[in-house]
Image (cartoon, rainbow, N blue to C red):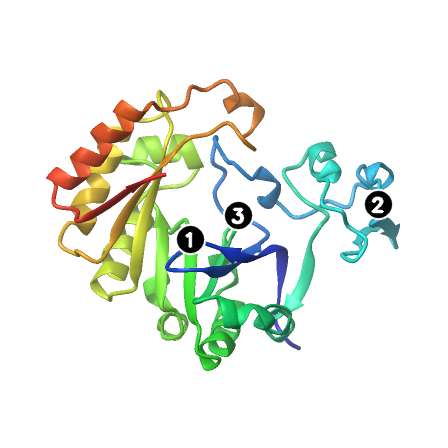
Amino acid sequence: MDLKAPVNKIIPFSSVDGFGNRTAVFLQGCNQNCLYCHNPETIHMCRNCGACVNTCPAGALMMENGRVSYDYSKCCNCDTCLKICQFDASPKIRNMTAGQLYEEIRGFFPFVNGITTSGGECSLYLDFLKEFYTLVQAAGKTTFMDTNGQIPLWEREDVLNVTDKTMIDLKAGSEEDHLFLTGKGLSVVTENIRRMAAMDKLYEIRTVVVPDAVDNLKTVELGSNLIANYPNVRYKLIKFRHYGVRENFSSTREPDDAYMKLLRDTALKAGVKDVLIV
């Protein structure tokens, strides 16, 4: 039987998900539980409770045999269902084979440099990605994996052979902070960064800067030390923003420009050649 993965959404043209203009594919499900998550509806699978069905103004949701059924053609993307859900999930999921996904997006290929898979956490579906990336590369487009680095990618040479670049989140600079922020340890993340950089499979690392939550300076120092010897690897520093975050972080202050500049200068001083603030 063909492998399938739960597709949350597809952005046909994105300029923020890797090199050039790219088609971004977001898969459902995540193995971290970040306190500041900006898209918590991608973390869990739908529990089929049905609470969202009667709230859908477009009639895109219905209950069938005890499960929530989603009609993609009717959806108006108002996200009413996401606001109703109490379980950090989404009913707007399509389980697709690699071939089905490829057929849906290949019409964008004349206008993009490649594809980026994201999430949720796309590395939960490495066998699926291997099939999908193989199809994309055969069409002459590049494949980027946007990942939290929690899965040991170096153990999957077969997947890396069809992965042009990875983009890895570095969310904290110590084991304690990483456990607090994500619920998971840090060691696999840093090992992924080291190994992907050494294999020339790392496009960038990214840190979301959340004031007062963790020691951001320590995070940037760690990240900079990991990539300083690789001039082609970019460090992207992302300002925490309130849009889409969980309620318990909705009043957290956003970092000011002076603080972001301090972190950028820290990375540059450590030898990082390319630092981007967004």
Rendering coords of residue 173 (x, y %): 27, 36
Question: Residue 147 bears which disc, if any?
Answer: 1
Q: Nearer the viewer, residue 190 or 115?
A: 115
The quadrant where residue 223 appears: top left
Residue lying at 66% horizontally and 77% vertically, measured from the top left: 1
Gap in angstroms between the C-alphas marked 3 and 2 = 28 Å
Residue lying at 81% horizontally and 51% vertically, measured from the top left: 67
**In this rendering, position of residue 13 left or right of residue 154:** right
Amino acid type at circle 3 is Cys
Residue lying at 47% horizontally and 72% vertically, measured from the top left: 133
**Whether residue 16 is situated above or below residue 242 in the rendered picture:** below
Determine the secondary structure under disc 1: strand
Which residue in the structure is indicated by mark 2?
58
**Whether residue 278 is situated above or below residue 24 in the rendered picture:** above
The quadrant where residue 11 appears: bottom right
Gap in angstroms between the C-alphas marked 1 and 3 = 10 Å
Rendering coords of residue 132 (x, y %): 52, 72
